[in-house]
Image: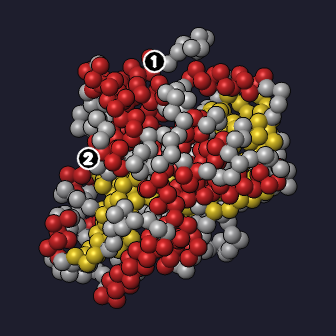
Amino acid sequence: MSATPRTPHASSLGAARRGRELAELADAAAPVDVLVVGLGATGAGVALDAASRGLTVAAVDAHDLAFGTSRWSSKLIHGGLRYLASGQLDVARESAVERGVLMERTAPHLVHAQPFVLPLTPLVPRRNATLAWSGLRAGDLLRASARTARATLPGPRRLSAVETLELAPGLRPYGLRGGLLSWDGQLADDARLVTAIARTAAAHGARVLTRVRALTLDGTGALVRDELTGEQLEIKARAVVNATGVWAGTLAGDIRLRPSRGTHLVLRSEALGGMRTGLHIPVPGESDRFVLVLPQGDGRVYVGLTDEPLDGPVPDVPKVPETDIGFLLDVLGSALDVPLRRGDVAGAFAGLRPLLDSGGADGDRTSDLSRRHAVLTSPDGVVTVVGGKLTTYRRMAQDAVDAVVAARGLSAGPCRTARLPLVGAAAPGTLAALDAPRRLVRRYGTEAPAVHALAVADPGLGRPVVPGLAVTAAELVWAVRHEGALDEADLLDRRTRIGLVPADRDAALAAAREALRELPAPSSPR
Ligand SMILES: Cc1cc2nc3c(=O)[nH]c(=O)nc-3n(C[C@H](O)[C@H](O)[C@H](O)COP(=O)(O)OP(=O)(O)OC[C@H]3O[C@@H](n4cnc5c(N)ncnc54)[C@H](O)[C@@H]3O)c2cc1C
């Protein structure tokens, strides 16, 4: 694995760097090569791709890293099985290839192999079980064709009823015929992936600026507003990439999206009886739709997800309707021995899929719209990259940068990101040998010992910020010093995911405020 530039602070984001780089951009006489708007997985990926090809880059987000859809995903780096089922072989293969890139080269610290069991309950007809088994076998062939090692992702296996219950003791034993075991990639956290991509871009010289909103764009730059001061400035650029996901149409009028809402529940793991695996629970009466049970390893389990068209304007943070919660609890209840009640739901979150409107009938189900990504050039020269998924962010970024390099005649090297480790990445042996708690290694990779050292030096920082959750104050301080966290929401809702449970968020607010005392005073940049 080749090394990322690792001078200690080249990848560090923070208030002081933000202030300095914004001032440089305001004073700059020459345009940057590429201005990226939006710092979800896609925009951060574009910033990294362009910067690592030797281009000068500014990348802005109106809010924070991973403020949008990228933090509301199922946190799966998946092999594209469902695209195989719908005959989109190219989309499925692209997913499988990108999953291998993340798991074996660029982010082995953040993505691990997660087992999933599909329980064969009385509600799963034998014909559907046979179909599901064929699908899992095909998924394994896809893994092999993407050259991902079986040691990285084991093959599928049929389970007896006893084995199924051993892995998932919460399942209803009555009538259980067995289960189908399969493996896929699971992220430690989606917002942390975006942070790692953005910091790797910064290590390659990209200016990564949060709280900077693009007001208007064209092919030669943007009028932006510093959301902290209200000041406006022009950023001049040779090429502009619009990576604003579900908001893409607000900046490029010719882009039409049909967002669809996906909801997840957050449950405490005790509520599910000590699940040792994820679950694919078939939606009763449907052969190709499943509710996923996703253990997070932090005492929480996510259960999702829905797929409902969004009506009306796109909100900053989507609300979760009670109907989505009821649907997910009902499907869970079809397979669990002790059904869960509304009171067992500790939190819930919804995200909006940035699906391209392909011009089909208005009544088309959003679940049928393609998850293919698109790179579209508007008449004014702005390049929009949209659609796709977290798993394929790298490929989306490559296609977008290829497009602007060709259209603008930029002088750039070839794409390098398939072999470029993200901040914290290392080979499994190196990660295993790190002297730090395993939980930190799974979130911070090679930086885990430095995060842990903060807690060792000051035991006050080593204590959990919320009883029952492992997150420590050291992680909050690290996020302020190195990960660009500027306020409580950045700390609690994105660098850590404490905020997914409102009661935990309330309990952690004081610790977040304490960590933010690390920030420089507004008038005295460090
Ligand atoms: C419920 C759900 C579950 C999913 N699960 C998975 C999964 O398990 N695996 C997977 O691979 N994919 C998954 N996806 C798909 C994946 O999450 C998205 O495709 C991906 O996150 C989109 O990223 P993005 O960067 O394009 O958009 P976003 O993450 O939405 O980023 C857009 C950014 O643009 C910023 N922005 C908007 N307007 C402006 C402006 N004017 N100026 C500056 N910045 C602006 C926003 O603040 C935001 O940060 C899921 C999607 C949903 C909805």
Residue 264 in view of the camera: no
Where does residue 174 sit, x and y in percent of width and height?
15, 77
- For marks 1 and 2, give the CA distance: 29 Å
Q: Is mark 2 on a helix, strand or loop?
A: loop
Q: For the residue with label 2, is its CB less than 8 Å from the closest atom of ligand 1?
A: no
Q: From the image, tell me which residue sits under label 2.
A: 299
User: Which residue is rendered at x = 69% and y = 26% of the image?
Assistant: 22
User: Which residue is rendered at x = 50% and y = 53% of the image?
Assistant: 351
Q: How is the image coloured?
A: secondary structure
Question: Considering depth in this image, is 320 or 461 the residue closer to the camera?
Answer: 461
Numbered tag placed on residue 518 in the rendering: 1
User: Which residue is rendered at x = 56% and y = 76% of the image?
Assistant: 89
- Which residue type carries mark 1? Glu
User: N-terminal of the two: label 1 or label 2?
Assistant: 2
Q: Is the C terminus in the top left, top right, bottom left or bottom right quadrant?
A: top right
Numbered tag placed on residue 490 in the rendering: none
In the shown orientation, is residue 359 left or right of residue 282?
right
Where does residue 284 sit, x and y in percent of width and height?
35, 77
- Which residue type carries mark 2? Gly
The correct choice, above or below, for 207 with respect to 71 in the image is: above
Camera-side mark, 1 or 2: 1
In the shown orientation, is residue 264 left or right of residue 55?
left
Where does residue 123 sit, x and y in percent of width and height?
28, 80
The correct choice, above or below, for 406 with respect to 68 in the image is: below
